Image (cartoon, rainbow, N blue to C red):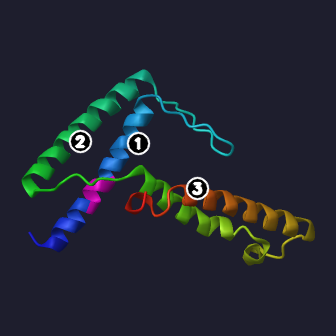
Amino acid sequence: MSSGHRRGIAATLVLLDEVLCDVTEWASGRSRRSVLIREDNDLSAGQRARLIAIVENARRLLAGAADRLGLEPETRYVSSSVWSACITARLGVAELASRHLNRYGEVPPELVDYMDDLSAALLRELDRMIDTVPGGAEEG
């Protein structure tokens, strides 16, 4: 197997493993609540049990594939994940500024200052989080 094959296969299987982690959390009752997120965990007890069993089987398949293909677990440092998530979020938050909102049509004058101030304030908070874990695990 070429290194390209290994990277491509590993990347797909890592993404699948992330999905399995999310499904496990939902099947275990996760229901996120925040300011603009209301996750309603409507899974029945039966659905939760079936999902857990399916995830366990999928993980056995992943473990077999990892063994057969010689794939090693990818270590992800939370500091790097926080840093990356904040850097990614910055792009969208910066585009909340009124000059970017013009792409949706003329921005009402009463919205200009509010959105510019909101964007700037949220960017400051993201920057504070980034500064807390500069560069993630590489520097953390």
Q: Is mark 3 in CB contact (under 8 Å) with mark 2?
A: no
Q: Is mark 3 in CB contact (under 8 Å) with mark 1?
A: no
Residue bearing mark 1: 22
Q: Residues within 10 Å of mark 2 (few under 14, many from 20)?
A: some
On the rendered structure, is 10 left or right of 118? left
Q: Is label 1 in a helix, a strand or a loop?
A: helix
On the rendered structure, is 121 left or right of 110? left
Quarter residue 28 falls in:
top left
Magenta portion: prevailing SS class: helix
Quadrant into which the N terminus falls:
bottom left
Q: Which one is earlier in the sequence, the residue at label 2 or at label 1? A: 1
Q: How far across and how far down the image is residue 132, in percent? A: 55, 55
Q: Amino acid at mark 2?
A: Ala
Mark 3 vs mark 2, foreground winner is 3
Give how far apart the Cα atoms at labels 3 and 2 are.
35 Å
100, 51: nearer the viewer: 100
Q: Is label 3 in a helix, a strand or a loop?
A: helix
Q: Amino acid at mark 1?
A: Asp
Q: Is residue 14 above or below residue 55?
A: below
Residue bearing mark 3: 129
Q: Residue at x 29, y 37 (%)?
A: 55
Q: How far across and how far down the image is residue 43, in percent? A: 47, 29
Q: Which one is earlier in the sequence, the residue at label 3 or at label 2? A: 2
On the rendered structure, is 28 left or right of 67? right
Quarter residue 103 falls in:
bottom right
Magenta residues, start to end: 11-15
Quadrant into which the C terminus falls:
bottom left
Q: Which one is earlier in the sequence, the residue at label 3 or at label 1? A: 1
Is residue 80 a member of the stretch shown in magenta?
Answer: no
Q: How far across and how far down the image is residue 54, in percent? A: 27, 35
Q: Is label 2 in a helix, a strand or a loop?
A: helix
